[in-house]
């Protein structure tokens, strides 16, 4: 192992974000963490809603004024999208936990499906919220 | 040859002394989140634009209060487990990591308590 040829050969790298080839399957895994973290922060909205409801009409009016404002609606829209994405990629992870779905084509398709379905579900929910459907 | 003692093998808990408990509870709460989350989203859709008294009357119903408390306990348990893994994977400085883990634990329990107390206060008559 002391000859210079093998010493100069590039050593195998463990998977790292900079050298990984991006695909829907790895993106789904990373997005699952990102959306989970976003939803964790989003529980502040849930807490504010419940505490405001318990505190009385004035506190509740402050909450609805915020959540009905453009910024509040953007946050709520983002949380809806994060919720559906986390739900769908979570279902994917539960399926993978059974030992199924590791065939590369099916695995990629399943991951891609989460990215197609979560915006659709989000738009359906918001269309319903705005009385469009 | 193995250096593990027969007792350690029988317990099967590994070096963290908790075995698969963390992993398993993350799955248990994930599965419970599916029906609870679906119920919550559908319920909130029905409350869009509702006044304070309507929302309070909805929370005060026993079935709503019970499902809300189950949902709250479940999501905060689940996010506590998830954020723990997130912190352990990405924060490598020992002091910062332990501070972050403590912060997440305290914050999730405090927020869950605030949520559950609010539901109980409303359902026990405000």
Image: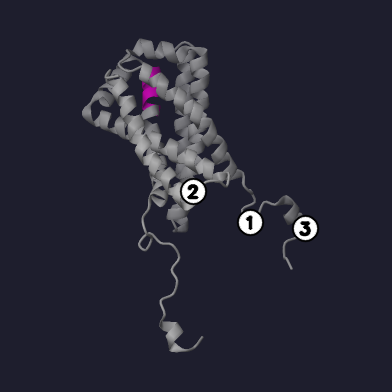
Part of the protein shown in magenta: A47-55
- The residue tagged 3 is B6
Name the residue furthest front. Answer: A105
Sequence order check, earlier mark of 3 and 1: 3
Observer able to see residue B34:
yes
Label 1 crowd bin: few (<14), some (14–19), many (20+), radius 10 Å: few
Q: Quadrant of residue A60?
A: top left
Asked if residue A45 lies in the magenta stretch, the reply is: no
Name the residue furthest right. Answer: B6
Is A3 situated above or below A31? below
Left or right: A19 as drawn, with respect to B65: left
* Label 2 residue SS: helix
Foreground: B103 or B73?
A: B73
Sequence order check, earlier mark of 3 and 2: 3
Name the residue furthest bottom. Answer: A3
Q: Position of residue A108 (x, y in %)?
A: 42, 48
Q: Quadrant of residue A61?
A: top left
- The residue tagged 1 is B15
Predominant SS of the magenta segment: helix
Q: Chain of mark 3?
A: B
Q: Quadrant of residue A111?
A: top left
Q: Residue at x 29, y 23 (%)?
A: A127
């Amino acid at each position: 192992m002391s000859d210079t040829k093998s010493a100069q050969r590039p050593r195998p790298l463990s998977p790292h974000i900079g050298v990984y080839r991006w695909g829907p399957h790895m993106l789904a895994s990373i997005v699952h963490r990102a959306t989970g973290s976003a939803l964790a922060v989003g529980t502040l909205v849930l807490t504010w809603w419940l505490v405001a409801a318990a505190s009385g009409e004035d506190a509740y009016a402050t909450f609805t004024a915020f959540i009905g404002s453009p910024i509040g609606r953007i946050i709520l829209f983002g949380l809806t999208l994060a919720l559906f994405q986390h739900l769908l990629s979570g279902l994917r992870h539960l399926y993978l936990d059974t030992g199924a779905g590791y065939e590369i084509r099916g695995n990629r398709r399943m991951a891609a499906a989460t990215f197609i379905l979560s915006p659709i579900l989000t738009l359906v929910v918001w269309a319903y919220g705005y009385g469009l459907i | 040859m193995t250096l593990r003692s027969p007792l350690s093998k029988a317990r099967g808990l590994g070096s963290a002394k908790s075995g698969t408990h963390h992993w398993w509870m993350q799955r248990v709460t994930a599965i419970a989140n599916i029906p609870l989350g679906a119920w919550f989203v559908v319920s909130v859709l029905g409350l869009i634009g509702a006044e304070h008294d309507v929302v309070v009357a909805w929370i005060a119903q026993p079935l709503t209060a019970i499902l809300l408390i189950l949902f709250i306990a479940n999501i905060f348990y689940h996010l506590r487990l998830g954020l723990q893994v997130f912190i352990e994977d990405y924060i490598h400085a020992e002091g910062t990591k332990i501070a972050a883990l403590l912060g997440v634990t305290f914050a999730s329990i405090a927020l869950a308590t605030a949520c559950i107390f609010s539901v109980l206060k409303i359902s026990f008559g405000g």
